[in-house]
Amino acid sequence: MDFSDFRKFVLRVGYPIHCVHCEGLDLSIEEPKHHPSYEITTKCNLNCVYCYSKVAVLNKTAPKPGYYGDLNPKAITISQYGEPLLAGVDRVAKIIERLRERFGDARIDLQTNGTIDFTDLDGLINIAMISLDTSNAESYEVITGSNKFNDVINNIEKAVDMDCTVTVRSVFLPGINDEELVKLAEMLGEMGVDEHFVQPCSVYNECLKDLQKLGFDLEKSESLYDYLRIVYRCSEFVETVIPGCIKVILDEILKQLGDFNDLKFVRRSAIARKPPKIRRDWKFVIE
Ligand code: SF4
């Protein structure tokens, strides 16, 4: 790895279009909230080893269906919890149409695990954010408990032909998917996806043992440097971005570091302190 190129990359790395309009970009807000969201279901057809949504279900902090947020949204996520397309693509289309009637041209970001074909939403969504953490079916099964890897790849390929930004979202699980993320980036570049959004893992206590059984390296997951090195390697193949709320903090850290090499000593806390809970108020449900 060329260290000077790595430094240049870290200074200019961007965040995904999804983060635009999020309070997380504004460091003056003490407790920033995620975008407004429309929650459809907390059910999921996968069982990802690190999933915050299943932790929320366990802790009874998962949201009931409906719209959460203020009534003049700039962007709405569908959904933060569960797999929305399990409700049926027609049902999701109807919800989006009703949200559009009410909120005009607010950006609609579909967040999905990509196992279900959503091409019928072409023209209705602005961003398709598809989760995928690995480059092959074997480790996909280890991480998600499912054999749907090829379905996800097919659905990413179909999404690339839709009229929306395609963002593939991957969680960096050091010790589990390091090299696979780089291989995945190569595949995504070839498929023509718009962005590869690589996130560090937030570890909930409920998931820690299962993660460690798979070889998860907690210490490495707390190193900002190790995370950025993987992001940099992925960027060789595809536009690779980091969470906006991390980008703004990274910029502050870099201003304060006398020497870029000291980034090696910066740690993040990987352990999530509270059970996941939606932080916006419930407003209404679409029947
Ligand atoms: S990653 Fe951070 S900045 Fe981006 S939408 Fe989520 S909370 Fe907001």
Image: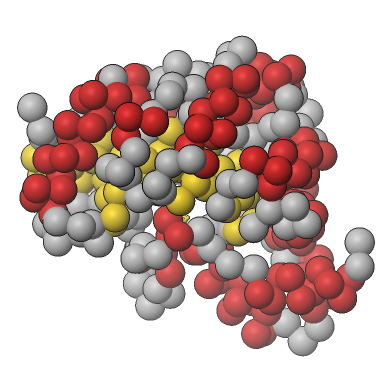
| Percent of width and height locating residue 186 | 75, 44
The answer to whether one can see residue 196 in this image is: yes
Q: Quadrant of the C terminus?
A: top left
| Percent of width and height locating residue 130 | 50, 37
* Residue 247, quarter of the rendered image: bottom right
Q: Is residue 47 above or below residue 191?
A: above
The answer to whether one can see residue 52 in this image is: no
Is residue 271 toward the left or the right of residue 95 in the image?
right
Residue at the image position 35 percent from the left and 54 percent from the top: 34
Q: Is residue 26 above or below residue 125?
A: below
Q: Is residue 280 above or below residue 159?
A: below
Residue at the image position 45 percent from the left and 16 percent from the top: 45
Give the colouring mode of the picture. secondary structure
Residue at the image position 12 percent from the left and 40 percent from the top: 98
Q: Quadrant of the N terminus?
A: bottom right
Q: Nearer the viewer, residue 20 or 260?
A: 20
Q: Is residue 186 above or below residue 71?
A: above
* Residue 228, quarter of the rendered image: bottom right
| Percent of width and height locating residue 31 | 35, 63
